[in-house]
Structure formats: C-alpha cells, structure tokens
Amino acid sequence: MNRQAENLGYSGTGEPEDVLRWALAEFYPDIAFAASFEHTVLIDMMTRIRPDIRVFSLDTGRLPEETFQCAAEAERHFKIHVDWYFPDRAAVELLTREQGVYSFRESLEARRHCCRIRKVEPLGRALQGLRAWITGLRQDEAESRRELRQIELDEGRGGLVKINPLAYWTDRQVRDYTHQRRLPYNRLFDCGYASIGCACCTRPIAPGEDPRAGRWWWESPEHKECGLHVNNRLNLRSDQTP
C-alpha cells in the first residue's frame, strides 16, 4: 500500500457522514465536491458539516435540462453556489468540424475522445490546487466500480485523495434518504433513468438491467466509463468491506 495512503489515518465508522466529517477536517479548504446532480444526498450531508464546502460541476454542452434544474434547486435549497466548468471552445469546435456532431457513436475511441474534451480536461482544471476531491460513486452502479472504496489515492491525477462516501450505499438507500429529507433530485429518475450523463449518451433502463446500461448503451459493459474515474487507484483501506 502507498505510504501516503497509510499516513492518512482515517479510522472512523465508515458511515458516509463520518467519512465526510474526517475528510473536511483533514483537507479543507483544499477539497471540493464534484456534483453530477443526479441527487443531492452528499450536498445535504456536507453542508450540515461545513456550509461553505466548494461544489463544482461539469457542463459538457450536452447535459439534459433536468440536470440544470436539479442544480438550480440545490443552489436554492442549500444556499450554495455551484462552480461550473466548461470544455475548451476551440477543442469542441475542432471536434465537431472534423468529425461531426455524432462522432462518439462511431467507435469506442471516438467516444472516449469526446469525453476527454467535454469532461476529462475540464475536470483537470477544476481539481487544480486541491489535495482531495469528493464524488458520489457507488459500487452498485457498474461492474467497473465493484472494487470502489470510500477513501482512495487517485494515482491517475497525481495522487489526489479521492473520497467516495457513498461507495457502499445502494440505490435504494440514496432514494430513501432523498425522500425522507425531501431533497432536490434529477427528475429523469422518475422516467426510468438510473444513471445520467449527456442527453445523447443516456437513456432509461428496463427493469432488472444494470444501472449503467443506459449509458453508452451501444458499447460493451466493461467500457461504461468516461475517463473521469480512472481505475489505477490505491485503496487506503484495502481490507475494508461493505
């Protein structure tokens, strides 16, 4: 295990709020939450610990209207400001001019190239100057996330500490928490969606399908990542189980 990870020293209960309380005490102000605005469970937890936590999101240029609606509701409900990051204009124009508006459907590499421009590069700018970042990732979302842990070293981004407080939660727990606390959420979940990204790459799923089945549905299940969450991670607590 990486020595930096061993020295982080988290020894809490593993409950999401406990993980957040430790992370905010350890890394604030050099920590931020990357919000996808599928739900607002973590914003609710974080703002009760630190109302001034930084929240950012990525506008790919192709998000569904419901995602912006959820973000606007979150800003009002929690009295926060969301920092939006956008793709490089010249890169998007060049991509569209040379490969067309639907090039991402032509091959896996073409789709990943689109994601690098619209998501990965803006995320890199959003993370500049931070020591840690918080995500809403969960193990039950996809096969590619089964080994997810609550606290990891993100070696793909220079060893940033990556905090995934909901790693061991289920979709039902997220929905129950949202309902019980009457939180804003993305209304596409009421229309059969289980995972929400760009409008052109996201669709509802059928009962019993994998939650990520509606993302890039023309690709194989093992490819259902966009590059934001790389897999060359080192777990802080590799012995921890859900």
Image (cartoon, rainbow, N blue to C red):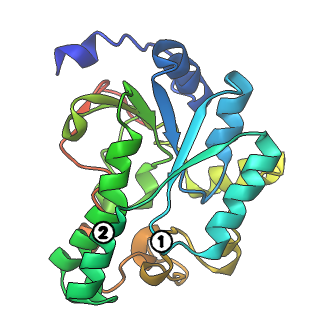
Neighbor class of circle 1 (other Cα within 10 Å; few <14, some 14-19, many 20+) is few
Q: CA–CA distance between discs 2 and 1?
A: 13 Å
Residue at x 37% of width, y 49% of height = 123
Residue 156 lies left or right of residue 53; in this view the side is left
Q: Between tags 2 and 1, which lies in front?
A: 2
Neighbor class of circle 2 (other Cα within 10 Å; few <14, some 14-19, many 20+) is few
Confirm whether residue 224 shows in the render.
no
Residue at x 41% of width, y 42% of height = 126
Quarter holding the C terminus is top left
For badge 2, the amino acid type reads Ala
Q: Position of residue 24 (x, y in %)?
A: 54, 20
Front residue of 63/213: it is: 63
Confirm whether residue 66 shows in the render.
yes
Q: Mark 2 or 1 closer to N-term?
A: 1
> Element type at marker 2?
helix
> Element type at marker 1?
loop
Residue 179 lies left or right of residue 96; in this view the side is right
Front residue of 123/192: it is: 123
Q: Please report contact status of discs 2 and 1: CB closer than 8 Å, yes or no.
A: no
Q: Determine the image quadrant of residue 124.
A: top left
As displayed, is residue 28 above or below residue 86?
above
Q: Position of residue 192 (x, y in %)?
A: 62, 79
Q: Which residue is mark 1?
A: 61
Q: Position of residue 103 (x, y in %)?
A: 26, 87
Residue at x 56% of width, y 26% of height = 20
For badge 1, the amino acid type reads Gly
As displayed, is residue 84 above or below residue 59?
above
As displayed, is residue 231 above or below residue 161?
below
Residue at x 51% of width, y 18% of height = 28
**Of the numbered discs in the image, which one, if any, rests on residue 90?**
2
